[in-house]
Image: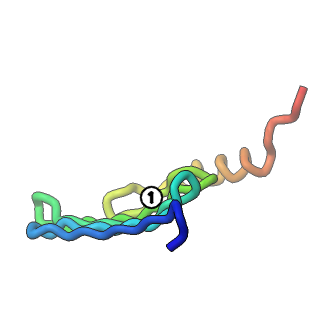
Amino acid sequence: MNQGQYKYAYETDNGIAGQEIGEGGKFAAGNGQWVADDGTHVFYEFTADKDGYRVKGSHVPEIPEYIQRSLDYIRAHPPKEI
């Protein structure tokens, strides 16, 4: 592993677990899981880099399609300099 890079993983007796890899100040990626009070297994994964923090998981709602279309349009048509 190069200087500035890291990785770790953990697991507890009550089913909480996670892992992450990254390079300080540049990127990180990982996942985790636990069992909710109602017995539901919750899993998530994430990435953090120059494009921001993005997470997907069984407990994270999906972006509605009409919002995603708007975001795509804004990204494709940035404001013009004055």
Farthest-out residue, top: 82
Q: Could you say where residue 59 lies in the image, as x and y percent from the top left?
A: 31, 59
Dividing the image into 4 quarters, which one contains the C terminus?
top right
Asked whether residue 43 is in view, the answer is no
Query: Mark 1: which amino acid?
Result: Val
* Residue 33 placement: quadrant: bottom left
In depth, the one of 57 and 65 nearer the eye is 57
Q: Could you say where residue 56 lies in the image, as x and y percent from the top left?
A: 43, 62
Farthest-out residue, front: 3
Asked whether residue 8 is in view, the answer is yes
Considering only vertical position in the picture, is 20 above or below 69? below
Farthest-out residue, right: 82
Q: Could you say where residue 69 lies in the image, as x and y percent from the top left?
A: 65, 53
Q: Mark 1: few, some, or many residues within 10 Å (few <14, many ≥20)? A: few
Q: Secondary structure at mark 1?
A: strand
Please report the residue visible at 62 percent of the width from the left and 53 percent of the height from the top.
51
Please report the residue visible at 57 percent of the width from the left and 50 percent of the height from the top.
52
Please report the residue visible at 16 percent of the width from the left and 60 percent of the height from the top.
36
Question: Would residue 43 appear left or right of 62 to someone viewing this image?
Answer: left
Please report the residue visible at 44 percent of the width from the left and 65 percent of the height from the top.
6
Question: Would residue 33 appear left or right of 70 to someone viewing this image?
Answer: left
In depth, the one of 35 and 50 nearer the eye is 50
Circle 1 sits on which residue? Answer: 55
Q: Could you say where residue 77 lies in the image, as x and y percent from the top left?
A: 80, 45
